[in-house]
Amino acid sequence: MTEKTPWYKDAIFIELNTRAFKDSNGDGWGDLPGLTSKLDYLKALGVDAIWLLPIMPSPLRDDGYDVSDFCNIFPAYGTMDDFKTLMNEAHQRELKIIVEIIPNHTSDQHPWFQASRDPNHPEHEKYRDFYVWSDTDKKYEDARIIFLDTEKSNWAFDEKRGQYFWHRFFSSQPDLNYDNPVVQQAMLDTVKFWIDAGADGLRIDAPPYLFEREGTNCENLPETHQFLKRMRKFVDEYKPDTLLVSEANQWPEDVVEYFGDGDEMHMNFHFPLMPRLFMALAKGDRSPIEEILARTPALPEGCQWGSFLRCHDELTLEMVTEEERQWMWETYAPNKAMRINLGIRRRLAPLMDNDSRKILLMHSMLLTMIGSPFLYYGDEIGMGDNIALLDRNGVRTPMQWDSSPNAGFSEAPADKLYTPLIDDPVYGYTRVNVVAQEADPASLLNRIRHLIAVRKQHPLLGRGDFEWKSFSFETKAVASYQRTYEGKRIVVLNNLRDTPVSGWIPETADKFVDILTGNVIHPGDYTLPSYGFIWLLPVE
Ligand code: NOJ
Protein backbone atom coordinates (compact mmCIF):
# COMPACT_ATOMS: atom_id res chain seq x y z
CA MET A 1 0.00 0.00 0.00
CA THR A 2 1.31 3.42 -0.88
CA GLU A 3 1.90 5.26 2.39
CA LYS A 4 0.16 8.43 1.35
CA THR A 5 -3.06 6.82 0.07
CA PRO A 6 -5.82 8.10 2.32
CA TRP A 7 -7.90 5.45 4.08
CA TYR A 8 -11.18 6.39 2.43
CA LYS A 9 -9.91 5.42 -1.02
CA ASP A 10 -9.76 1.80 0.09
CA ALA A 11 -12.83 1.85 2.30
CA ILE A 12 -16.23 0.25 1.91
CA PHE A 13 -18.94 2.31 3.59
CA ILE A 14 -22.40 1.43 4.81
CA GLU A 15 -25.08 3.93 5.71
CA LEU A 16 -27.62 3.07 8.34
CA ASN A 17 -30.26 4.56 10.53
CA THR A 18 -29.67 3.93 14.23
CA ARG A 19 -33.42 3.82 14.73
CA ALA A 20 -33.81 1.00 12.21
CA PHE A 21 -30.89 -1.23 13.13
CA LYS A 22 -31.31 -2.84 16.55
CA ASP A 23 -33.33 -1.98 19.64
CA SER A 24 -31.48 -2.83 22.88
CA ASN A 25 -34.06 -1.73 25.45
CA GLY A 26 -37.36 -2.96 24.06
CA ASP A 27 -38.94 0.43 23.34
CA GLY A 28 -39.43 -0.34 19.65
CA TRP A 29 -36.73 2.06 18.44
CA GLY A 30 -33.24 1.09 17.42
CA ASP A 31 -30.54 2.71 19.53
CA LEU A 32 -26.78 3.16 19.87
CA PRO A 33 -26.25 0.21 22.27
CA GLY A 34 -28.23 -1.94 19.82
CA LEU A 35 -26.02 -0.81 16.96
CA THR A 36 -22.92 -1.46 19.08
CA SER A 37 -24.10 -5.03 19.63
CA LYS A 38 -24.23 -5.53 15.84
CA LEU A 39 -20.77 -4.22 14.96
CA ASP A 40 -19.50 -7.76 14.45
CA TYR A 41 -22.13 -8.26 11.76
CA LEU A 42 -20.94 -5.12 9.96
CA LYS A 43 -17.33 -6.16 10.31
CA ALA A 44 -18.14 -9.59 8.84
CA LEU A 45 -19.92 -7.89 5.95
CA GLY A 46 -16.56 -6.31 5.16
CA VAL A 47 -17.33 -2.65 5.65
CA ASP A 48 -14.71 -0.25 7.00
CA ALA A 49 -16.83 2.76 7.86
CA ILE A 50 -20.37 3.31 9.07
CA TRP A 51 -22.22 6.49 8.14
CA LEU A 52 -24.86 7.15 10.75
CA LEU A 53 -27.93 8.99 9.56
CA PRO A 54 -28.75 11.92 11.89
CA ILE A 55 -28.44 11.02 15.58
CA MET A 56 -29.08 14.46 17.06
CA PRO A 57 -32.23 15.56 18.89
CA SER A 58 -35.01 16.34 16.44
CA PRO A 59 -38.79 16.45 16.18
CA LEU A 60 -38.29 14.00 13.26
CA ARG A 61 -40.34 15.90 10.72
CA ASP A 62 -37.54 15.07 8.26
CA ASP A 63 -36.25 11.98 10.04
CA GLY A 64 -33.57 13.81 11.99
CA TYR A 65 -32.48 16.16 9.21
CA ASP A 66 -34.47 18.73 11.18
CA VAL A 67 -32.05 19.14 14.08
CA SER A 68 -33.10 20.83 17.32
CA ASP A 69 -29.72 20.51 19.09
CA PHE A 70 -26.48 20.01 17.17
CA CYS A 71 -24.47 18.84 20.17
CA ASN A 72 -26.46 15.99 21.66
CA ILE A 73 -28.01 12.60 20.98
CA PHE A 74 -31.68 11.95 20.18
CA PRO A 75 -32.92 10.56 23.53
CA ALA A 76 -34.43 7.34 22.14
CA TYR A 77 -31.03 6.52 20.59
CA GLY A 78 -29.15 6.85 23.90
CA THR A 79 -26.64 9.25 25.39
CA MET A 80 -23.27 10.77 24.55
CA ASP A 81 -21.77 7.99 26.71
CA ASP A 82 -23.47 5.42 24.48
CA PHE A 83 -21.98 7.20 21.50
CA LYS A 84 -18.51 7.05 23.07
CA THR A 85 -18.96 3.34 23.77
CA LEU A 86 -19.97 2.83 20.14
CA MET A 87 -16.85 4.71 19.03
CA ASN A 88 -14.57 2.63 21.27
CA GLU A 89 -16.09 -0.66 20.20
CA ALA A 90 -16.00 0.38 16.54
CA HIS A 91 -12.36 1.44 16.77
CA GLN A 92 -11.41 -1.83 18.47
CA ARG A 93 -12.72 -3.54 15.34
CA GLU A 94 -11.00 -1.04 13.04
CA LEU A 95 -14.36 0.37 11.97
CA LYS A 96 -14.75 4.09 11.46
CA ILE A 97 -17.83 6.15 12.28
CA ILE A 98 -19.09 8.99 10.09
CA VAL A 99 -21.54 11.39 11.73
CA GLU A 100 -24.12 13.37 9.76
CA ILE A 101 -23.87 17.16 10.02
CA ILE A 102 -26.67 19.28 8.60
CA PRO A 103 -25.24 22.76 8.07
CA ASN A 104 -27.94 24.20 5.80
CA HIS A 105 -30.88 24.31 8.17
CA THR A 106 -32.30 23.46 11.58
CA SER A 107 -35.67 22.36 12.85
CA ASP A 108 -38.14 25.15 13.52
CA GLN A 109 -38.06 23.77 17.08
CA HIS A 110 -34.37 24.61 17.45
CA PRO A 111 -33.89 27.19 20.25
CA TRP A 112 -32.03 29.40 17.73
CA PHE A 113 -35.13 29.61 15.55
CA GLN A 114 -37.46 30.02 18.50
CA ALA A 115 -35.41 33.02 19.65
CA SER A 116 -35.04 34.37 16.13
CA ARG A 117 -38.76 34.35 15.33
CA ASP A 118 -39.97 35.86 18.61
CA PRO A 119 -39.22 39.56 19.20
CA ASN A 120 -40.12 39.08 22.87
CA HIS A 121 -37.73 36.21 23.39
CA PRO A 122 -34.96 37.14 25.88
CA GLU A 123 -32.31 36.08 23.36
CA HIS A 124 -33.98 37.54 20.28
CA GLU A 125 -31.23 40.08 19.62
CA LYS A 126 -28.57 37.38 19.68
CA TYR A 127 -30.38 35.10 17.23
CA ARG A 128 -32.31 37.64 15.17
CA ASP A 129 -30.13 37.18 12.08
CA PHE A 130 -29.52 33.45 12.39
CA TYR A 131 -32.03 32.70 9.64
CA VAL A 132 -32.91 34.23 6.27
CA TRP A 133 -35.83 36.59 6.93
CA SER A 134 -37.61 38.83 4.46
CA ASP A 135 -40.63 41.11 4.28
CA THR A 136 -41.46 39.67 0.90
CA ASP A 137 -41.65 36.18 -0.56
CA LYS A 138 -40.58 37.49 -3.95
CA LYS A 139 -36.83 37.22 -3.43
CA TYR A 140 -34.57 34.54 -4.97
CA GLU A 141 -37.25 33.46 -7.38
CA ASP A 142 -34.76 31.60 -9.58
CA ALA A 143 -34.20 28.98 -6.87
CA ARG A 144 -35.97 25.70 -7.59
CA ILE A 145 -38.21 23.94 -5.07
CA ILE A 146 -36.65 20.64 -4.03
CA PHE A 147 -39.49 18.93 -2.12
CA LEU A 148 -41.92 19.48 -4.96
CA ASP A 149 -44.60 17.16 -3.57
CA THR A 150 -45.03 19.07 -0.33
CA GLU A 151 -43.76 22.63 -0.78
CA LYS A 152 -45.18 25.36 -2.98
CA SER A 153 -42.56 28.00 -2.15
CA ASN A 154 -39.12 28.34 -0.58
CA TRP A 155 -40.60 31.00 1.70
CA ALA A 156 -42.92 30.47 4.67
CA PHE A 157 -44.60 33.18 6.71
CA ASP A 158 -43.97 33.30 10.45
CA GLU A 159 -46.79 34.92 12.41
CA LYS A 160 -44.71 35.80 15.44
CA ARG A 161 -42.01 37.65 13.58
CA GLY A 162 -44.35 38.91 10.88
CA GLN A 163 -41.84 38.02 8.16
CA TYR A 164 -41.11 35.25 5.71
CA PHE A 165 -38.26 32.80 6.33
CA TRP A 166 -36.32 30.93 3.66
CA HIS A 167 -36.28 27.12 3.50
CA ARG A 168 -34.91 24.91 0.72
CA PHE A 169 -36.53 21.76 2.15
CA PHE A 170 -39.63 21.33 4.36
CA SER A 171 -41.08 24.55 5.80
CA SER A 172 -40.38 23.05 9.23
CA GLN A 173 -36.66 23.40 8.36
CA PRO A 174 -35.65 27.07 8.18
CA ASP A 175 -32.34 27.71 6.40
CA LEU A 176 -29.52 29.19 8.44
CA ASN A 177 -28.15 32.55 7.37
CA TYR A 178 -24.54 32.01 6.32
CA ASP A 179 -24.05 35.71 5.72
CA ASN A 180 -23.97 35.93 9.50
CA PRO A 181 -20.42 35.12 10.68
CA VAL A 182 -21.78 33.90 14.01
CA VAL A 183 -23.74 31.18 12.17
CA GLN A 184 -20.59 30.12 10.35
CA GLN A 185 -18.74 29.87 13.64
CA ALA A 186 -21.62 27.94 15.25
CA MET A 187 -21.36 25.33 12.50
CA LEU A 188 -17.59 25.04 12.89
CA ASP A 189 -18.20 24.56 16.62
CA THR A 190 -20.59 21.71 15.74
CA VAL A 191 -17.90 20.12 13.59
CA LYS A 192 -15.43 20.44 16.47
CA PHE A 193 -17.93 18.94 18.91
CA TRP A 194 -18.30 15.74 16.88
CA ILE A 195 -14.59 15.46 16.19
CA ASP A 196 -14.02 15.77 19.94
CA ALA A 197 -16.62 13.04 20.47
CA GLY A 198 -14.46 10.77 18.31
CA ALA A 199 -16.12 10.89 14.86
CA ASP A 200 -13.78 9.75 12.09
CA GLY A 201 -15.63 11.71 9.49
CA LEU A 202 -18.63 13.87 8.79
CA ARG A 203 -21.22 13.61 6.05
CA ILE A 204 -22.13 17.15 5.10
CA ASP A 205 -25.80 17.32 4.18
CA ALA A 206 -27.04 19.45 1.29
CA PRO A 207 -24.03 21.77 0.93
CA PRO A 208 -25.04 23.51 -2.33
CA TYR A 209 -27.62 25.75 -0.69
CA LEU A 210 -25.77 27.54 2.12
CA PHE A 211 -25.89 31.03 0.59
CA GLU A 212 -28.53 32.92 -1.38
CA ARG A 213 -27.86 35.59 -3.98
CA GLU A 214 -30.43 37.44 -6.11
CA GLY A 215 -30.33 36.60 -9.81
CA THR A 216 -28.85 33.13 -9.24
CA ASN A 217 -30.41 29.72 -8.62
CA CYS A 218 -28.86 29.92 -5.14
CA GLU A 219 -26.88 26.71 -5.65
CA ASN A 220 -23.11 26.18 -5.73
CA LEU A 221 -22.35 29.86 -5.08
CA PRO A 222 -18.73 30.98 -4.61
CA GLU A 223 -19.53 32.03 -1.04
CA THR A 224 -20.71 28.49 -0.29
CA HIS A 225 -17.41 27.06 -1.53
CA GLN A 226 -15.50 29.60 0.54
CA PHE A 227 -17.27 28.47 3.69
CA LEU A 228 -16.73 24.78 2.91
CA LYS A 229 -13.03 25.48 2.37
CA ARG A 230 -13.00 27.17 5.74
CA MET A 231 -14.55 24.05 7.27
CA ARG A 232 -11.90 21.88 5.61
CA LYS A 233 -9.12 24.15 6.82
CA PHE A 234 -10.45 23.89 10.34
CA VAL A 235 -10.60 20.09 10.11
CA ASP A 236 -7.11 19.85 8.60
CA GLU A 237 -5.68 21.93 11.41
CA TYR A 238 -7.71 20.35 14.20
CA LYS A 239 -7.75 16.64 13.28
CA PRO A 240 -6.30 16.07 9.83
CA ASP A 241 -7.53 12.51 9.24
CA THR A 242 -11.18 13.50 9.58
CA LEU A 243 -13.09 12.76 6.39
CA LEU A 244 -15.57 15.24 4.91
CA VAL A 245 -18.07 13.58 2.57
CA SER A 246 -20.42 15.92 0.84
CA GLU A 247 -23.85 15.35 -0.56
CA ALA A 248 -23.84 17.74 -3.48
CA ASN A 249 -26.50 16.35 -5.78
CA GLN A 250 -25.33 18.17 -8.91
CA TRP A 251 -23.96 17.56 -12.40
CA PRO A 252 -20.35 16.31 -12.51
CA GLU A 253 -18.94 19.65 -13.65
CA ASP A 254 -20.61 21.38 -10.67
CA VAL A 255 -19.79 18.63 -8.19
CA VAL A 256 -16.07 18.79 -8.89
CA GLU A 257 -16.15 22.31 -7.50
CA TYR A 258 -16.83 20.71 -4.11
CA PHE A 259 -13.38 19.14 -4.18
CA GLY A 260 -11.82 22.57 -4.78
CA ASP A 261 -8.12 22.14 -5.45
CA GLY A 262 -8.08 19.31 -2.97
CA ASP A 263 -8.85 21.88 -0.26
CA GLU A 264 -12.62 21.44 0.08
CA MET A 265 -14.44 18.10 0.54
CA HIS A 266 -12.47 14.85 0.45
CA MET A 267 -15.35 12.94 -1.07
CA ASN A 268 -18.57 13.67 -2.93
CA PHE A 269 -21.24 11.26 -3.97
CA HIS A 270 -21.50 10.75 -7.71
CA PHE A 271 -25.24 11.37 -7.96
CA PRO A 272 -25.55 11.43 -11.77
CA LEU A 273 -23.88 8.04 -12.16
CA MET A 274 -26.34 6.24 -9.90
CA PRO A 275 -29.55 6.43 -12.02
CA ARG A 276 -27.50 5.62 -15.12
CA LEU A 277 -26.45 2.28 -13.65
CA PHE A 278 -30.16 1.46 -13.37
CA MET A 279 -30.82 2.84 -16.85
CA ALA A 280 -28.00 0.82 -18.43
CA LEU A 281 -29.24 -2.36 -16.82
CA ALA A 282 -32.85 -1.90 -17.91
CA LYS A 283 -31.81 -0.96 -21.46
CA GLY A 284 -29.13 -3.67 -21.66
CA ASP A 285 -26.83 -0.94 -22.96
CA ARG A 286 -23.85 0.69 -21.26
CA SER A 287 -24.19 4.00 -23.16
CA PRO A 288 -25.76 6.02 -20.31
CA ILE A 289 -22.80 5.13 -18.08
CA GLU A 290 -20.32 5.95 -20.84
CA GLU A 291 -21.90 9.34 -21.36
CA ILE A 292 -21.79 10.37 -17.72
CA LEU A 293 -18.28 9.07 -17.10
CA ALA A 294 -17.13 11.00 -20.17
CA ARG A 295 -18.52 14.11 -18.46
CA THR A 296 -16.83 13.29 -15.16
CA PRO A 297 -13.65 15.32 -14.66
CA ALA A 298 -10.50 13.96 -13.03
CA LEU A 299 -10.26 14.68 -9.32
CA PRO A 300 -7.57 16.56 -7.45
CA GLU A 301 -5.03 14.55 -5.47
CA GLY A 302 -6.46 12.95 -2.34
CA CYS A 303 -10.09 13.20 -3.47
CA GLN A 304 -12.49 10.35 -4.11
CA TRP A 305 -15.96 9.75 -5.46
CA GLY A 306 -18.55 8.05 -3.29
CA SER A 307 -20.59 5.62 -5.37
CA PHE A 308 -23.89 4.09 -4.38
CA LEU A 309 -26.92 2.23 -5.66
CA ARG A 310 -29.58 3.13 -3.12
CA CYS A 311 -29.76 5.24 -0.01
CA HIS A 312 -32.26 6.41 2.60
CA ASP A 313 -33.82 8.88 0.14
CA GLU A 314 -35.71 8.31 -3.06
CA LEU A 315 -33.67 7.14 -6.04
CA THR A 316 -33.27 10.67 -7.21
CA LEU A 317 -33.84 11.58 -10.84
CA GLU A 318 -32.79 15.20 -10.50
CA MET A 319 -29.61 14.67 -12.52
CA VAL A 320 -31.21 13.16 -15.64
CA THR A 321 -33.09 14.75 -18.55
CA GLU A 322 -36.89 15.06 -18.48
CA GLU A 323 -37.17 12.29 -21.07
CA GLU A 324 -34.88 9.98 -19.09
CA ARG A 325 -36.86 10.69 -15.93
CA GLN A 326 -40.13 9.67 -17.58
CA TRP A 327 -38.48 6.51 -18.88
CA MET A 328 -37.05 5.67 -15.45
CA TRP A 329 -40.45 6.23 -13.80
CA GLU A 330 -42.22 4.06 -16.35
CA THR A 331 -39.60 1.35 -16.06
CA TYR A 332 -38.87 1.27 -12.35
CA ALA A 333 -41.92 2.92 -10.78
CA PRO A 334 -44.95 1.87 -12.84
CA ASN A 335 -47.19 2.41 -9.83
CA LYS A 336 -47.44 6.15 -9.11
CA ALA A 337 -47.25 5.45 -5.36
CA MET A 338 -43.64 4.40 -5.96
CA ARG A 339 -42.76 7.95 -7.01
CA ILE A 340 -41.91 10.90 -4.81
CA ASN A 341 -40.65 14.36 -5.76
CA LEU A 342 -38.31 13.70 -8.71
CA GLY A 343 -37.54 10.14 -7.75
CA ILE A 344 -38.47 6.59 -6.88
CA ARG A 345 -39.03 5.45 -3.31
CA ARG A 346 -38.11 1.79 -3.62
CA ARG A 347 -35.32 -0.42 -2.36
CA LEU A 348 -32.76 -2.19 -4.50
CA ALA A 349 -34.19 -5.73 -4.42
CA PRO A 350 -37.70 -4.75 -5.58
CA LEU A 351 -36.17 -2.50 -8.25
CA MET A 352 -34.30 -5.56 -9.49
CA ASP A 353 -37.48 -7.70 -9.45
CA ASN A 354 -35.80 -9.63 -6.64
CA ASP A 355 -33.53 -11.20 -9.24
CA SER A 356 -30.29 -11.96 -7.41
CA ARG A 357 -28.35 -12.02 -10.69
CA LYS A 358 -29.27 -8.38 -11.28
CA ILE A 359 -28.65 -7.38 -7.66
CA LEU A 360 -25.19 -8.93 -7.82
CA LEU A 361 -24.44 -7.40 -11.21
CA MET A 362 -25.25 -3.96 -9.82
CA HIS A 363 -22.88 -4.67 -6.92
CA SER A 364 -20.22 -5.77 -9.39
CA MET A 365 -20.41 -2.34 -11.03
CA LEU A 366 -20.64 -0.57 -7.67
CA LEU A 367 -17.52 -2.27 -6.36
CA THR A 368 -15.32 -1.99 -9.45
CA MET A 369 -16.26 1.07 -11.48
CA ILE A 370 -15.40 4.28 -9.69
CA GLY A 371 -14.73 5.57 -6.20
CA SER A 372 -15.49 4.09 -2.80
CA PRO A 373 -18.82 2.26 -2.50
CA PHE A 374 -21.56 3.05 -0.03
CA LEU A 375 -24.00 0.24 0.76
CA TYR A 376 -27.41 0.86 2.29
CA TYR A 377 -28.32 -1.31 5.28
CA GLY A 378 -30.63 -4.20 4.43
CA ASP A 379 -29.85 -4.20 0.71
CA GLU A 380 -27.18 -6.83 1.38
CA ILE A 381 -29.94 -9.28 2.32
CA GLY A 382 -32.36 -8.04 -0.33
CA MET A 383 -34.83 -6.30 1.96
CA GLY A 384 -38.05 -5.01 0.44
CA ASP A 385 -39.89 -1.73 0.90
CA ASN A 386 -43.36 -0.57 1.89
CA ILE A 387 -44.83 2.09 -0.36
CA ALA A 388 -47.87 2.39 1.91
CA LEU A 389 -45.70 4.31 4.38
CA LEU A 390 -45.46 8.06 3.99
CA ASP A 391 -42.60 10.05 2.50
CA ARG A 392 -39.41 7.95 2.20
CA ASN A 393 -40.22 5.83 5.26
CA GLY A 394 -40.92 2.76 3.14
CA VAL A 395 -37.16 2.28 2.62
CA ARG A 396 -36.33 2.91 6.28
CA THR A 397 -37.97 -0.09 7.96
CA PRO A 398 -36.35 -2.21 10.71
CA MET A 399 -33.42 -4.45 9.86
CA GLN A 400 -34.45 -8.07 9.48
CA TRP A 401 -32.18 -10.11 11.71
CA ASP A 402 -34.11 -13.37 12.03
CA SER A 403 -37.53 -14.95 11.66
CA SER A 404 -38.61 -14.50 15.30
CA PRO A 405 -41.36 -11.99 16.18
CA ASN A 406 -40.22 -8.46 15.26
CA ALA A 407 -37.45 -9.97 13.14
CA GLY A 408 -35.04 -9.98 16.09
CA PHE A 409 -35.01 -6.19 15.81
CA SER A 410 -36.87 -5.43 19.04
CA GLU A 411 -38.56 -7.07 21.98
CA ALA A 412 -41.27 -4.41 22.13
CA PRO A 413 -44.87 -5.34 21.34
CA ALA A 414 -45.25 -5.14 17.54
CA ASP A 415 -47.48 -2.07 17.77
CA LYS A 416 -44.73 -0.16 19.59
CA LEU A 417 -42.18 -0.44 16.77
CA TYR A 418 -41.32 2.98 15.30
CA THR A 419 -42.66 1.66 12.01
CA PRO A 420 -44.01 -1.71 10.84
CA LEU A 421 -41.65 -4.42 9.66
CA ILE A 422 -41.69 -5.64 6.08
CA ASP A 423 -44.01 -8.61 6.35
CA ASP A 424 -45.11 -9.42 2.80
CA PRO A 425 -44.85 -12.90 1.23
CA VAL A 426 -41.75 -12.09 -0.85
CA TYR A 427 -39.61 -9.78 1.27
CA GLY A 428 -41.09 -10.42 4.73
CA TYR A 429 -38.70 -11.05 7.59
CA THR A 430 -39.59 -14.70 8.00
CA ARG A 431 -38.08 -15.29 4.55
CA VAL A 432 -35.54 -12.49 4.20
CA ASN A 433 -33.30 -12.26 7.25
CA VAL A 434 -29.66 -12.32 8.30
CA VAL A 435 -29.70 -15.62 10.21
CA ALA A 436 -31.20 -17.56 7.31
CA GLN A 437 -28.73 -16.04 4.85
CA GLU A 438 -25.70 -16.55 7.05
CA ALA A 439 -26.50 -20.27 7.07
CA ASP A 440 -26.71 -20.49 3.28
CA PRO A 441 -23.40 -20.23 1.40
CA ALA A 442 -25.25 -19.24 -1.80
CA SER A 443 -27.31 -16.48 -0.16
CA LEU A 444 -27.22 -12.91 -1.38
CA LEU A 445 -25.56 -11.88 1.88
CA ASN A 446 -22.73 -14.37 1.50
CA ARG A 447 -22.21 -13.54 -2.15
CA ILE A 448 -22.08 -9.81 -1.45
CA ARG A 449 -19.66 -10.47 1.40
CA HIS A 450 -17.50 -12.37 -1.05
CA LEU A 451 -17.55 -9.55 -3.63
CA ILE A 452 -16.56 -7.08 -0.93
CA ALA A 453 -13.78 -9.33 0.36
CA VAL A 454 -12.32 -9.70 -3.13
CA ARG A 455 -12.56 -5.98 -3.82
CA LYS A 456 -10.61 -5.35 -0.63
CA GLN A 457 -7.81 -7.67 -1.70
CA HIS A 458 -7.28 -5.43 -4.73
CA PRO A 459 -6.87 -1.81 -3.65
CA LEU A 460 -6.47 -0.77 -7.28
CA LEU A 461 -10.26 -1.11 -7.53
CA GLY A 462 -10.50 1.87 -5.18
CA ARG A 463 -7.54 3.85 -6.38
CA GLY A 464 -6.95 2.96 -10.01
CA ASP A 465 -7.63 4.81 -13.24
CA PHE A 466 -10.71 3.82 -15.21
CA GLU A 467 -10.74 3.07 -18.92
CA TRP A 468 -13.40 1.49 -21.14
CA LYS A 469 -11.87 -1.57 -22.76
CA SER A 470 -13.99 -3.68 -25.07
CA PHE A 471 -11.86 -6.82 -24.79
CA SER A 472 -13.59 -7.62 -28.09
CA PHE A 473 -16.98 -7.56 -26.36
CA GLU A 474 -17.89 -4.80 -28.79
CA THR A 475 -21.55 -4.88 -28.00
CA LYS A 476 -22.92 -2.15 -25.76
CA ALA A 477 -24.60 -4.93 -23.79
CA VAL A 478 -21.35 -5.41 -21.90
CA ALA A 479 -19.98 -2.80 -19.53
CA SER A 480 -16.33 -3.73 -19.89
CA TYR A 481 -13.52 -1.69 -18.46
CA GLN A 482 -10.06 -1.80 -17.04
CA ARG A 483 -8.79 -0.34 -13.78
CA THR A 484 -5.06 0.33 -13.57
CA TYR A 485 -2.81 1.38 -10.74
CA GLU A 486 0.94 1.34 -10.31
CA GLY A 487 1.47 -0.96 -13.30
CA LYS A 488 -1.23 -3.45 -12.31
CA ARG A 489 -4.60 -3.87 -13.95
CA ILE A 490 -7.92 -5.64 -13.52
CA VAL A 491 -10.44 -6.07 -16.30
CA VAL A 492 -14.14 -6.21 -15.47
CA LEU A 493 -16.88 -7.47 -17.78
CA ASN A 494 -20.55 -6.98 -16.83
CA ASN A 495 -23.28 -8.42 -19.06
CA LEU A 496 -26.25 -6.05 -18.82
CA ARG A 497 -28.61 -8.38 -20.70
CA ASP A 498 -30.71 -11.40 -19.88
CA THR A 499 -29.08 -13.38 -22.68
CA PRO A 500 -25.55 -14.79 -22.78
CA VAL A 501 -22.99 -12.67 -24.66
CA SER A 502 -20.02 -14.18 -26.45
CA GLY A 503 -16.76 -12.45 -27.13
CA TRP A 504 -13.07 -12.99 -27.18
CA ILE A 505 -10.50 -12.52 -24.46
CA PRO A 506 -7.41 -11.31 -26.32
CA GLU A 507 -3.85 -12.36 -25.71
CA THR A 508 -2.90 -9.30 -23.75
CA ALA A 509 -1.70 -11.72 -21.10
CA ASP A 510 -0.75 -15.39 -21.10
CA LYS A 511 -3.69 -16.08 -18.89
CA PHE A 512 -6.04 -14.40 -16.46
CA VAL A 513 -7.28 -15.29 -13.03
CA ASP A 514 -10.97 -14.83 -12.39
CA ILE A 515 -10.47 -13.27 -8.97
CA LEU A 516 -14.00 -14.07 -7.84
CA THR A 517 -13.61 -17.83 -8.33
CA GLY A 518 -9.87 -18.35 -8.59
CA ASN A 519 -10.37 -20.07 -11.98
CA VAL A 520 -7.73 -19.57 -14.64
CA ILE A 521 -9.04 -18.19 -17.95
CA HIS A 522 -6.98 -18.50 -21.10
CA PRO A 523 -7.29 -16.04 -23.98
CA GLY A 524 -9.88 -17.09 -26.53
CA ASP A 525 -13.63 -17.42 -26.85
CA TYR A 526 -15.55 -16.52 -23.74
CA THR A 527 -19.26 -16.39 -23.00
CA LEU A 528 -20.69 -14.29 -20.21
CA PRO A 529 -23.94 -15.74 -18.87
CA SER A 530 -27.12 -13.63 -18.63
CA TYR A 531 -26.44 -10.78 -16.19
CA GLY A 532 -23.06 -12.41 -15.55
CA PHE A 533 -19.86 -10.63 -14.63
CA ILE A 534 -16.23 -11.46 -14.27
CA TRP A 535 -13.25 -9.66 -12.69
CA LEU A 536 -10.00 -10.67 -14.42
CA LEU A 537 -6.46 -10.25 -13.14
CA PRO A 538 -3.87 -10.79 -15.88
CA VAL A 539 -1.01 -13.11 -15.04
CA GLU A 540 1.78 -11.29 -16.87
C1 NOJ B 1 -30.67 15.34 2.17
C2 NOJ B 1 -31.02 14.14 2.99
O1 NOJ B 1 -30.40 13.01 2.43
C3 NOJ B 1 -32.53 14.03 3.01
O2 NOJ B 1 -32.94 12.85 3.65
C4 NOJ B 1 -33.10 15.26 3.68
O3 NOJ B 1 -34.51 15.21 3.63
C5 NOJ B 1 -32.60 16.53 3.00
N1 NOJ B 1 -31.17 16.52 2.81
C6 NOJ B 1 -32.93 17.75 3.83
O4 NOJ B 1 -32.12 17.78 4.97
Image (cartoon, grey):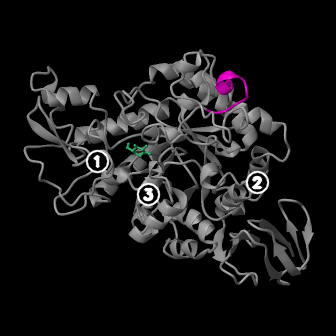
Where does the image place residue 86, in percent across and percent down from the top left?
60, 27
| Number of the label disc, if any, that sits on residue 451 | 2
Where does the image place residue 286, in percent across and percent down from the top left?
61, 74
Element under disc 1: loop
User: Is 305 rendered above or below residue 501?
Assistant: above
Magenta span dominant secondary structure: loop
Which quarter of the frame holds ligand 1?
Answer: top left
User: Is 69 rendered above or below residue 540?
Assistant: above
Residue at 64% across, 40% down: 378
| Quarter of the view holding residue 470 | bottom right
Residue toward you, 294 or 10: 294
Q: How many marks?
A: 3
Which residue matches tag 3? 263
Q: Nearer the viewer, mark 3 or mark 1?
A: 1
Which residue matches tag 1? 168
Q: In the visual, does 391 lie left or right of 133?
A: right
Of marks 3 and 1, which one's residue comes earlier in the chain? 1
Element under disc 3: loop
User: Which quadrant is home to the C terminus?
Assistant: bottom right
Mark 1 C-beta closer than 8 Å to ligand 1: yes
Where does the image place residue 524, in percent across and percent down from the top left?
88, 82
Q: Nearer the viewer, mark 3 or mark 2?
A: 2
| Number of the label disc, if any, that sits on residue 188 | none
Element under disc 2: helix
Residue 78: tell me if it is visible: yes
Q: Residues within 10 Å of mark 1 (few under 14, many from 20)?
A: many
Question: Which residues, given as a range, are shown in magenta?
Answer: 399-408
Residue 485: tell me if it is visible: no
Q: Which amino acid does the dot numbered 1 rest on? A: Arg
Is 405 in the magenta?
yes
Of marks 1 and 2, which one's residue comes earlier in the chain? 1
